Amino acid sequence: MSLIVQKYGGTSVGNPERIRRVAERVLATQQAGHQVVVVVSAMSGVTDSLIRLAREVSPEPSEREMDVLLATGEQTTIALLAMALNARGSRAVSLTGAQAGIVTDGTHTKARIANITPTEMRRLLDDGQIVIVAGFQGQTMAGQITTLGRGGSDLTAIAIAAALGAETCQIFTDVEGVYTCDPRIVPSARKLDELSYEEMLEMASSGSKVMQSRSVEFAKKFGVVFEVRSSFNDAPGTRVVEENMSMENVVIRGLSVEKNQAKITIADVPDRPGTAAAVFGALEKSGTVIDVIVQNVSHTNATDISFTLHKDDLDKARAALEPVVKEIGAARLEAKSGIAKLSVVGIGMRSHSGVAAKLFACLGSAGVNIQMISTSEIKIAVIIEEADITRAANVAHEAFGLANGALLAN
Ligand code: ADP
Ligand code: ASP
Ligand code: MG
């Protein structure tokens, strides 16, 4: 008998009616002859409102207590889904992350899965039961509750699929699959039938939050084939698979948009060894996550260093850098929010040139100013004003012909 892991995100379990509909879909999967493990998220909005509650009682809640709090969101949904299934006469059991045997490291709020002991899940499945697991959470060896970072239920599902050797992992969400760009930003975006792990990973880590990027990394590492599809209809979704030969013929697979970014520039940094180390060392100590970094060639023995970060980290970064700016003898620090990043992604870029020129030309004609550029083997990203991002994404989507079938190499 084959085993399927299904994951339902927050919107898909957002109210009692939707939970009942998920129960029907799960039951139909079992009745089609499969063993089923279901991973669920907290009902939509619940994790955000728990975070707000925490901030109302404490300006800086401890990460341990945040995990104890946030894990309750998923715990509500597993019990409700099990009740809905049992009310239909099926046998379903809910398990917390710890009960499912998910062991993590101790990095509260961003824990990594260390291993999964699936003994209890297997016992229940072999007994003919439907197993419902709380996404996004685990437990340390010492018994502390942990969570896996925002969007972490995707990781729970992929990791369970790997641990149980599932035939497939289905990620049910509120769109029909992975699109050429977030359809909320580019209305003409097209659903992709298939893309490679690498492309999905690059898209996810540059802002396409349809999948949590660490879950894609995990799937790639352990060869877990997964499909992203809609929980509201039966349309076939997007399969994320190992790269194949024909994939390189498509130059650009999709675009990603990342909003809520900020930029810091340290002006007139003396051009000598150790200054970049001092700047980024201080940022690392403060726990600031840096994205794109640009340092110019110096003509006057001084240079500017600019980098981007999430806007929520701006104050923390500024506080960490002010003493460093003085120490290294730089002129000043300029900080600015209202920045966004647009990335174009495709493994075809490895073998086709001209992508950068085409991207810059279409943004230029649309009057979008590029502030920074960063590239990887399969991605070109530009930093622009956040006010321009929707227009930029739409013109780039059009320029690369993504709405009418992906741009094929000549
Ligand atoms: P869930 O709660 O099911 O985990 P998410 O909100 O995490 O759902 O992910 C689904 C959302 O991801 C969609 O509603 C869509 O707005 C957004 N998204 C961003 N980029 C893409 C993309 N390239 N393709 C599809 N959806 C995308
Ligand atoms: N509930 C968590 C979040 O909102 C995990 C998830 O939905 O995947 O981030
Ligand atoms: Mg999600």
Image: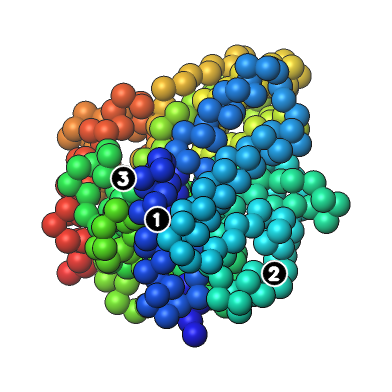
- In the picture of the structure, the residue carrying the numbered disc 1 is 22
Q: Does label 3 point to a residue whose CB lies under 8 Å from ligand 1?
A: yes
| Residue 170 appears in the figure | no
Of residues 259 and 75, the one nearer the viewer is: 75
Badge 2 crowding class, 10 Å Cα cut-off, few under 14, some 14 to 19, many 20 or more, is: some
Residue at 60% x, 14% y is 332
The image position of residue 194, as x and y in percent, is 32, 68
Q: In the picture shown, does residue 291 fall above or below 87? A: above
**The disc labelled 1 sits on which kind of residue?**
Val
The residue indicated by pointer 3 is 182
Q: Which residue occupies 32% across, 56% down? A: 230
> Image check: 149 left or right of 64?
left
Q: Judge the density around disc 3: few (<14), some (14-19), many (≥20) Cα neighbours within 10 Å.
A: many
Q: Nearer the viewer, mark 2 or mark 3?
A: 2
Above-or-below relation of 34 to 267: below
Q: Is label 1 in a helix, a strand or a loop?
A: helix
Q: Quadrant of the C terminus?
A: bottom left
Which residue position holds label 2? 120
The residue lying toward the viewer, choosing from 227 and 127, is: 127
